[in-house]
Amino acid sequence: MELNLLLRLFTAHLLTDFVLQPKSWVKDREEKQGKSFKLYLHVTITTLFAYTFSGQYDNWVIPMVIFISHLAIDYLKSKVNKDNFNYFIADQIAHLLVIVSLSMSFDRDWMAIHTYANATFGNHKFWILTAGYLFVSWPLGIIIGKATQKWRDQITRETILRSESHQPAPDTSEPSENTTPDITPPPVAEVIKNSEEQELGLASAGKWIGICERILILTFVLMGQYTAIGFLMTAKSILRFSEKEANTQLKTEYVLVGTLVSFATSAMIGVLINLALK
């Protein structure tokens, strides 16, 4: 792979897609889609930067491929018209694949690439590390979630009981003909779910916080940076709940238990991986 060309094209992409593209251009593209002048202006600027940064001014393949691929990818994204994280990642991966493909197409030493790929994917250490990071990212989070489920249920029950105790007494007067009938309350499961989401924080935030902290713990153990784990635990211990909130002690204990289990299991997996790599 032409590493120098890859870095040049990647730098041009970062500049034009993030630094030099105002939000108003993105909004205009989403609203007008293929009729957006800002879409073609952005693609043209991206192509010019890629061509300039490449240094290969006698090669028209690079600007042609960048222009066509970037226009197609951004147009398809505007058709979807969904500005969320998943579509953003898919968009950036598509651009990156084009850049990598261009860089590889100008590398004539295909045997070197083949040898490097075989050496990497044929090495058991690569698969040990890959399996380790995958395990601490998602499966371990699911295991910890199931292990701490009973405490989440306890917090939810306490929250529902507190909310019910503060509700006004029901109206026992005879309903008139014009009185709107009471709306049937939602099922208990729905109440528990909504209460849990409100009381325990943003939806999926805890999951991603756990994934990040377990990846960091595993990385620190593999690198032998045990002091960094202490700093991470100290930073996590700063978390506090407002004294005005209900069930403050239960929430704090729940977070501490989950954190300690997450840290301990990730560290033990890191130690096991280190032993397997020796």
Image (cartoon, rainbow, N blue to C red):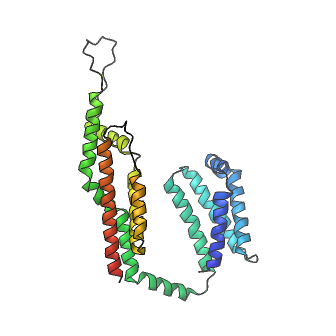
- Residue furthest out toward the right: 58
The answer to whether residue 215 is visible is no
- The location of residue 232, given as percent across then percent down, is 42, 61
> Can you say which quadrant of the picture contains the N terminus?
bottom right
Q: Residue at x 28, y 13 (%)?
A: 175
> Can you say which quadrant of the picture contains the C terminus?
bottom left
User: In this image, 189 relative to 220: left or right?
Assistant: left
Residue closer to the observer: 139 or 161? 161
The answer to whether residue 218 is visible is yes
User: Is residue 123 shown above or below 32?
Assistant: below
User: Is residue 248 shown above or below 277?
Assistant: above
- The location of residue 17, given as percent across then percent down, is 64, 59
User: In this image, 201 relative to 49: left or right?
Assistant: left
- The location of residue 39, given as percent across then percent down, is 67, 54
Count of labels in the image: 0
Residue 58 in which image quadrant = bottom right
- The location of residue 191, given as percent across then percent down, is 30, 37
Residue closer to the observer: 67 or 163? 163
Residue 64 in which image quadrant = bottom right
Q: Residue at x 56, y 49 (%)?
A: 81
Residue closer to the observer: 23 or 233? 233
